[in-house]
């Protein structure tokens, strides 16, 4: 860990100058205390750095939570071993692609029975919070159980003992994005009305005790729940696909579901703080967590070490090394095919911006996180599914 100054601690051995400067701008905000923690996967983000843990007193920066509220991971360890996954993996992949709508903006055609109780729970929670999610996204109920695009994925993986895990990454879809964008705008309007001098307009903040703050917290918590249930719904469908393909029921040995774009009210160093983890997971002592690599590299099942200086946090993944446009300029379809040898995936240039080389070295990220988490299992892909 590097102490850049008293207000900025850094766990990234590879930190680009622009990322460092962005983090320094963030910690100039007067309500951040005691310090911001940069995770090993830190890279440039909107307003605040992706891969940062931002504790704030009586204020929240909506852009520091991110626009995919509640984005995170879910994994299930099955009772199967890799020796039982020797059939037609392309057929398994295409069945997953049919069962779970992929890509940005997509929705289910109908609400499936597995989704009905989850949607009912969310509708009741929204009513109790005093807002209508349809005002943010009309199709919010039909999008529950859909993946999205970009770095979101569904995978069948194997661990170091040859046990099969089901693994996926997604968040709160269109409704969470719209909620986030609206409150970022409200925060900018509030900051302008107060006459705040901001180093970046996306560091605009909401003051605790105001109606605007309360509305954001209510909708944020709802969107975080939506994201968690969205992952649960997709996992149930993924399990169904595997059961149909292998011809036997999936016995769940373990299930882990964790956010990496979220805010919680916590106590650290004797102070009540809003802790925004933007591209970071909670890693309290013994707490299970999930840290994915890229579409062709290892992912990790971890256990938190409860590091107080990191505010009980750890990295959320590899973190981008190249922008999407830069990745497309730098690599070819042949490069992607080489990186994905031995993995069943959809062979298309659409995934060039997700090529593993566009991301930081996940093994270096995990080495930098040695005092934040303990590695329990290392996962390698058997099947990868992504949206365009």
Image (cartoon, grey):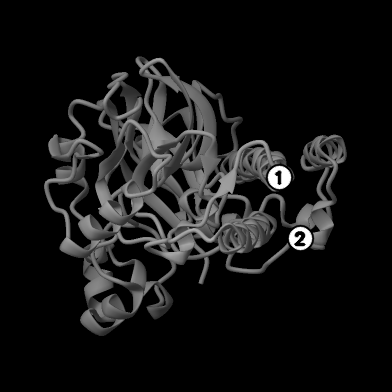
Question: Which residue in the protein does label 1 denote?
Answer: 219
Which is nearer the eye, 142 or 27?
Answer: 27
Residue closest to the far front: 195
Q: Is residue 237 left or right of residue 267?
A: right
| Marks 1 and 2, how far apart at CA | 10 Å
Image quarter of residue 335:
bottom left
| N-term-proximal mark, 1 vs 2 | 2
Q: Is residue 193 left or right of residue 218?
A: left
Residue 381 location (% of width, % of height): 34, 48
Q: How many other residues sit within 10 Å of disc 2, few (<14), some (14-19) or many (≥20)?
A: some
Q: Is residue 292 visible?
A: no
| Picture coordinates of residue 325, whole percent (x, y) | 33, 80
Q: Residue at x 43, y 59 (%)?
A: 151
Looking at the rendered structure, the secondary structure element under dot 1 is: helix
Q: Residues within 10 Å of mark 1 (few under 14, many from 20)?
A: many
Spot occupied by residue 341 in the image (x, y as percentages of width and height):
25, 62
Assign the N terminus to one quadrant of the image.
top left
Instruction: Give the answer, above or below, for where 253 lies relative to 21.
Output: above
In front here: 307 or 304? 307
Residue pictured at 29% horizontal, 67% vertical: 355
Marks 1 and 2 in Cβ contact (< 8 Å): yes
Query: In the visual, does 28 lie left or right of 124?
Result: left
Residue 357 as seen in the image, left or right of residue 250: left
Q: Nearer the viewer, residue 340 or 303?
A: 303
Residue 292, quarter of picture: top left
The picture places residue 130, in percent across and down from the top left corner, at: 85, 42
- Residue at which label 2 appears: 136
For the point 19% across and 25% down, the residue is: 371
């Amino acid at each position: 860990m590097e102490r850049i100054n008293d207000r900025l601690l850094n766990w990234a051995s590879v930190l680009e100058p622009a990322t460092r400067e962005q983090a320094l701008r963030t910690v100039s905000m007067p309500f951040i205390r005691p310090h911001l923690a940069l995770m090993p996967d830190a890279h440039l983000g909107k307003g605040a750095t992706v891969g940062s843990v931002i504790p704030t007193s009586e204020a929240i920066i909506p852009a520091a939570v991110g626009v995919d509220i509640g984005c995170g991971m879910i994994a299930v360890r099955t009772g199967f071993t890799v020796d039982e996954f020797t059939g037609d993996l392309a057929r398994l992949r295409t069945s997953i692609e049919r069962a779970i709508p992929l890509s940005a903006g997509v929705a289910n055609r109908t609400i499936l029975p597995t989704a009905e109780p989850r949607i009912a729970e969310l509708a009741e929670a929204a009513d109790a919070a005093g807002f209508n999610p349809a005002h943010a996204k009309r199709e919010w109920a039909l999008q529950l159980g859909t993946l999205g695009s970009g770095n979101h994925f569904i995978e069948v993986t194997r661990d170091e003992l040859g046990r099969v895990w089901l693994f996926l990454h997604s968040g709160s879809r269109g409704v969470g994005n719209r909620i986030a964008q609206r409150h970022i705008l409200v925060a900018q309007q509030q900051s302008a009305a107060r006459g705040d001098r901001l180093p970046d307009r996306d560091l605009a903040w909401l003051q605790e005790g105001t109606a605007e703050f309360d509305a954001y917290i209510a909708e944020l918590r709802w969107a975080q729940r939506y994201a968690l249930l969205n992952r649960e719904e997709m996992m149930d469908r993924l399990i169904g696909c595997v059961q149909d393909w292998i011809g036997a029921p999936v016995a769940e040995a373990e299930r882990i579901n964790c956010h990496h774009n979220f805010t919680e009210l916590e106590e650290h160093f004797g102070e009540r703080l809003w802790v925004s983890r933007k591209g970071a997971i909670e890693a309290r002592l013994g707490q299970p967590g999930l840290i994915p690599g890229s579409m062709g590299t290892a992912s990790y099942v971890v256990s938190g070490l409860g590091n107080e200086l990191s505010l009980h946090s750890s990295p959320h993944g590899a973190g981008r090394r190249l922008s999407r446009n830069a990745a497309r300029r730098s690599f070819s379809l042949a490069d992607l095919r080489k990186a994905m040898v031995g993995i069943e995936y959809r062979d298309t240039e659409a995934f060039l911006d997700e090529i593993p080389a566009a991301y930081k070295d996940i093994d270096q990220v995990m080495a930098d996180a040695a005092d934040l988490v303990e590695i329990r299992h290392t996962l390698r892909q058997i099947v990868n599914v992504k949206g365009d």
